[in-house]
Amino acid sequence: MGRALAVVSSVFGLMLLGGCDANGDFGQITEDFHYSYPLQSGGHLELNNSNGSVEISGWDRDSIDVSGTKYATDQAALADIKVVVSATGSQATVSTEMPKTHWHGSRGVRFHVRVPRKITLQRAETTNGSVTVEDLEGGGSIRSSNGKLSLARLSGDYDVQTTNGSIQVDDCTGMQKVETTNGAIRGRIKNGAIQAQSTNGTLDLTVEKPAESRPIRLSTTNGSLTLALAEFHGNPINAETSHGSVTLRLPSDTNANLEAETSMASVSSDLTLSSVEERSKHSLRGRLGSGGAAISASTNMGSIRIQRY
């Protein structure tokens, strides 16, 4: 048996709500909710929120706990918002239902969800707001149409995307595919690989132990790019930006074929090449150690630095 609790509170103020998830409740009428149901470990979660932030974290219990707050500017609009939670066996769905005729910026739902640590996020999505996911094992899909994405201590292969906002990845294991159309991507991968792309933002990522021979790709159209590898395990690397510098920090014992080229600045390397095919102010091509996987770094406007980790 599950349990549900809803508490309604009205708060008045002078704040005018914007187009995104609000940080406070001034000028809003709010209603808190809480649902709890049994949920077996190793299953799937699908969460779809129409407007507002989402927080999902794993715990060592065979249950799903969903709490949060609905908000709107008047009681009638608040009553139109429906939170639907369903859990059967190892499958759970959480969703928000509200009329599409209203301006979503004036109302929405903030979710706090706890699930068994071993679970696959079939889809976790909000159309307007941040998404935070922590302490899960299982992989999955995470989306926001307008908001920051934060991932911490995840294990598995995740596909992560926001159309407008930054992405932070901390202490994750597995293959991470992250993309934003406008924002920075930063973080640290403990074990695995990453493919990161931004159309307008800085990329700054560290991989402590890359998965054997797995490719690592970083790309941005406008911003600097930094990639650091504490170890090298035959990983093909492609790092490119159109406007900004590129910095690669690699172990001294890296065995790879290096190609670095910039149109408007210089290329430098702290690592000694065992053989050089081309060296000029704007390009460097040659072999690191005994050669191996291809490492490519390129930019149109900015310097390229190959540094020792």
Image (cartoon, rainbow, N blue to C red):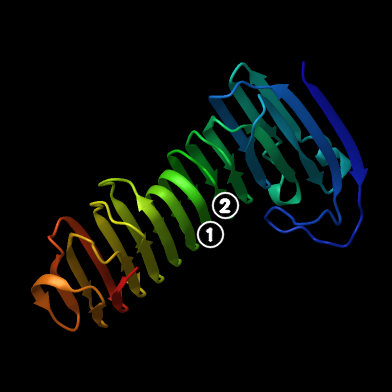
Q: Nearer the viewer, residue 15 or 141?
A: 141
Vertical side of 120 occupied by 29: above or below? below
Determine contact: label 2, label 1, CB under 8 Å. Answer: no
Q: Which mark is residue 150?
A: 2
Identity of the residue drawn at 32% across and 55% down = 217
Locate residue 135: give its quadrant: top right
The picture places residue 188, in percent across and down from the top left corner, at 47, 56
In the drawing, does residue 137 fall left or right of residue 285? Answer: right
**Going 9% across and 73% down the picture, which residue do you hit?**
276
Q: Which sits earlier in the primary sequence, circle 2 or circle 1?
A: 2
Disc 1: which residue:
166
Q: Which amino acid, mark 1?
A: Ser
Please state if 88 lies on the left or on the right of 295 as rendered.
right
Residue 259 in the image: above or below residue 115? below
Q: Quadrant of the C terminus?
A: bottom left
Mark 1, secondary structure of its residue:
loop
Residue 127 is at least partly visible in this image: no
